[in-house]
Structure formats: C-alpha cells, structure tokens
Amino acid sequence: MQSTLLGICYFIIFIGIVLPVTTAQSHVGVAQTVVDLGELDRGTDNIATFFLVTSTSKSFLVSLNKEPANIDFFSRRGYENHLYNHSEEDVMGWVELFSNSVEVEPLSEGGTGLIGAQKEVKFILNIPEDAESGYHIFRIKPLPVFPSGDVGGPVGAMVVSVTTVTFLFNIEGKAIRDGIILDVVPEEITNGRFITGTYFQNTGTTTITAVASQRIHKNGELVAESSSSKTLVNPGEIKVLKTPFSANNFSEGYYDVSTSVNFLSDSVSKNSTILVSAALPPPVEEKPNLLWLLIIVVVIFIIAIIIYKIS
C-alpha cells in the first residue's frame, strides 16, 4: 500500500515538472471579506474604505460593481442574531463610488522576490433621513479587466479568482418585522390556471420579503398546494401575493384554504373558505354577416344607378 501511494506521488511530481503551464493565474481579492461600518446616523455622508489585494506582477484595472447582498449572509457565524433586526430596503442608491474602476499597481517587497499589490478603495455611503432602523448589507464585487495581450499561456488562457466584500452597517432603532393577512381572494379560472390573491400588509417598521404558501382542501382532502413568488413589502404597504395552481385540480364549489406568509424571521397564518367559480368560456369573435353585407352593397349600387340616370 505504501509503495502504491509513493508511486502516485512520484507520478504527480513528474507531471508537474514535465508538463508546461498553459494558464496564467491571477487572484484579485479583498483584505477583508466583511467590513462592519458600525452604527451610522441618518442624514449623514460617510467615507468607507476597503483594500484590494492581488498576486499579479502587472498593472491592471479593476472594475467595481455594487450589488445587493444575499440574505444568506446572516447564516455566517457571529451574524445569526442580526437576522431578526435587519432591514431589506434597497440601499444601492446610497452607495456612491468615486470611480467605476481603479488601477492596481504591483509592488516588489525588497529582495524577497515576493510580488503583489494592495490598493485602497474609498467610496461614499449616503444615509437618508428616512433610513429604516436595523442592520443593512450590500456588496462590492471587484472584477479585473486585462488587456487582450496580457493573457498568459500558449493558448492565451487567463484564470481569475474574484472575492467579493460585504459591507454591514446599523441604523439606530429596532427593526420590527411583522405583518398581517387581511384576506384571501379567489380569481377566475383562466388559461388553465387558478390563482388566489393573498392581501398581506406589512405592519412592522422595516422592508421585508414576503412569500405566501397555501394548502387547499375540499371535504377534508388535500387538493393542491403552492407558493407565490418573493415580493418586497415596505412598512405599512399592502401587497397582493398571487399563488398559482393548476385549474385541473378544481371544480366549482367551496374550498378550505390554509395560508401562511413567511418573511424570513417570522410568519403569520390564516384559515379561510373560498368559492371557486366555473371557468368562463373564451369570448367568441363575432363575424360579420356576409349576406347582409352583400344586400347593402347591391342597394347602394342600385341607388347610384338611379341617381346617375336622373342626372
């Protein structure tokens, strides 16, 4: 067994020495993958900083792309409790980049032969006066831009590894995440689909993502279950969460509906009864009566002849 493992190791070393390197590798990342900006005041402009790092030996441009952060961020160790006190309002308009791209210049550290670069990047974070309370997150993704002639290897291949930095900040106050189901309304069956509308109101103080899930029963037996798409709901706002079902599962009559609206950190439920109406037949296009049209044309022709003879 040992001789077999030793043989495999020798083979890997041989491959690494004999085969030529066919790709140039470059890693562009950040000194910190998460930057906590702390608590920021409403109505303030704040300078934020992060550092780009790379192992490349050539100067190149890095484009900077701001984007919403994924809610999965709060599943990271140390940030789980922030999930219950965070706001999902859009903060992309608050992030003001000084430039959409920066130049990264390599630095050689003494005689060690170690080559790399570190670039400080600054931007402005404008906090509006009406910013919602709670934790907010967003991301900046650096993307290297290499001239076409700078790719390495005999086939011109370039392998680039990119790391995104997530920014976290807090606005004073508690982000209350709550809501209520006002009503569940059936819609007519059309185009082979039956859709229900769940009227949901955000009664909290922060923007939330809501999803309606429904189970429909008739005479105690499950007929169908489905969920709506994710919908952002602002504080105080009422949104209709539409849940689609296949119309083949329904006939005219009364059905019991169990509705649950989930907004990540909590959920609300409501039981109701709905009446499903029969599907309306498709509208019939009225075609003109050709016989009457022919009669009208003949009458007009006769009148024209009479007028012509009289004149």
Image (cartoon, helix red, strand yellow):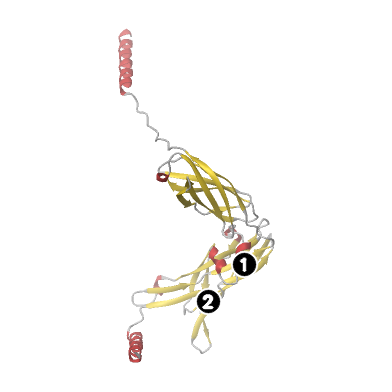
The location of residue 98, given as percent across then percent down, is 58, 65
Q: How many other residues sit within 10 Å of disc 1, few (<14), some (14-19) or many (≥20)?
A: few
Q: Amino acid at mark 1?
A: Asn
Q: Which mark is residue 104?
A: none
State the residue lying farthest toward the bottom: 3
x 35%, y 78%: residue: 22
User: Residue 194 location in percent, x, y?
Assistant: 45, 44
Q: Amino acid at mark 2?
A: Val
Judging depth in this view, the residue of 109 and 18 nearest the camera is 18
Q: Quadrant of the C terminus?
A: top left
Using the image, determine if residue 192 lies above or below residue 284.
Answer: below
The front one of 11 and 97 is 11
Q: Quadrant of residue 95?
A: bottom right
> Where is residue 204 drawn, in percent x and y?
64, 54
Residue 192 quadrant: top left
Q: Earlier in the sequence, mark 2 or mark 1?
A: 2
Q: Position of residue 230 (x, y in %)?
A: 52, 54
Looking at the rendered structure, the secondary structure element under dot 1 is helix
User: Where residue 81 is drawn, which disc sits there?
Assistant: 1
Q: Which residue is label 2 attached to?
A: 53
Left or right placement of residue 48 versus residue 253 in this view: right
Image point (32%, 83%), residue name: 19
* Mark 2 element type: strand
Instruction: Identify which residue, 264 or 247, lies in the foreground.
Output: 247
Task: Answer yes or no: is residue 69 visible.
Answer: no
Q: CA distance from mark 2 to mark 1?
A: 30 Å
Residue 78's place in the image compared with 207, above or below, is below
Quarter of the image with the N terminus in it: bottom left
Number of marks = 2
